Amino acid sequence: MGEIAREVLKLLEEAGGEYVSGSSIARRLKVTRAAVSKAVAKLRKRGFIIESHPKLGYRLVACDDLSRAQSYVSALGTRVRYTLHYLPSTMSTQDVAKTLAEHGAPEGAVVVAEEMSAGRGRLGRKWHAGPGGLWLTVLLRPQCPPARIQLFSILAGVAAAQAIEEICGIKPEIKWPNDVLLKGRKVCGVLVEVSAEADAVRYLLLGVGINVNNELPEELKEIAISLKEVVGKTVPRLPLLLAFLSRLDDLYEHLKSGDDEFILKEWRGRASTLGKRVRVICYDEVVEGTAVDIARDGSLLLKMDDGSMRTIQVGDVIHLR
């Protein structure tokens, strides 16, 4: 983010939503007004909503109204041209996005809903998506072979973790492939669904669910957690949405340029799975070993008890120790 931007953000947060003049910020940080303006522009690109007034200065806005997202998304300056489709309620944002994709919607269509009645997660699990959470699906049309799809799963988890850290100031971990964890419990899940032919991807749906201010069912409280529970206050969802789309855009650009290692490095820096003994439940077997790394395509590399290496492309990981 940059040191000046961090300091500007801190001053705006301390102001509690009140305006702070640019000259006042410049004096306190001992920088130029131009440096303050540049820092504000950087923060806006990161997803923070900062309003400006010619006489009063700047103020940080904690907005939770997702229906207002399009105007702010357009100002992010992302390479992907995001178009928001806001729904008060739906069965599944994945299903709505799939319909849009099949009818020719361009890359960057984003379906976001206040709640879902039939949300789903990885491996066919039901995803509880009540009011107060951030539930969305992003449509992408990457020009890549199906063999690279796993990287999008890795990429989406990293983007969500980065957005949470950016807005909430807490660093989540990631359990392979893309479960985002806080205090060892799941705060965000990712579902990747793809329509592909033998040698090309037609479109890809990145479904992301983040527990923000929503109430979790009693039966999930030992394994799931909300951002509100961690930070101790309500978290505005609109800046979190903007931050996620901004980080997704940056990581997607690395992937398109062939810089897969950048994405894998970001994942490794947050990985809770590496170095642990794990049990992996695959479709037709259960294997145990030590997770040592991820491959270039995002697969998990296990060292087995006999010293051999095993590559896991799809499976449910349980950390043993």
Image (cartoon, helix red, strand yellow):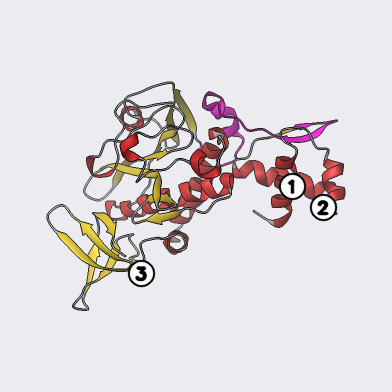
Left or right placement of residue 5 versus residue 53 in this view = left
Label 1: how many residues lie within 10 Å, few (<14), some (14-19) or many (20+)?
many
**Residue at the spot of label 3:** 275
Residues under labels 2 and 3: Cα distance?
42 Å
Q: Secondary structure at mark 2?
A: helix
Q: On the image, which quarter does residue 147 sit in?
A: bottom left
Type of the residue with mark 2: Leu
Residues 120 and 138: in front is 120
Residue 56, percent from left and from top: 83, 31
Q: Is residue 79 visible from the viewing direction of this image?
A: no
Query: Earlier along the polypeptide chain: callout 3 or callout 1?
Result: 1
Left or right placement of residue 95 versus residue 174 in this view = left
Label 3: how many residues lie within 10 Å, few (<14), some (14-19) or many (20+)?
some
Type of the residue with mark 3: Gly
Q: How many marks?
A: 3
Label 2: how many residues lie within 10 Å, few (<14), some (14-19) or many (20+)?
some
Query: Earlier along the polypeptide chain: callout 1 or callout 2?
Result: 1
Q: Nearer the viewer, mark 2 or mark 3?
A: 3
Contact check, label 1 and label 2, Cβ < 8 Å: yes
Q: Residue at x 34, y 56 (%)?
A: 176
Is 86 a magenta residue? no
Give residue 8's mark. Answer: 1
Q: Residue at x 51, y 38 (%)?
A: 228
Q: Residue at x 23, y 59 (%)?
A: 280
What residue span does the magenta drawing correspond to?
Answer: 52-81
Query: Earlier along the polypeptide chain: callout 2 or callout 3?
Result: 2
Q: Secondary structure at mark 1?
A: helix
Residue 98, percent from left and from top: 31, 31
Residues 25 and 53: in front is 25
**Residue at the spot of label 2:** 29
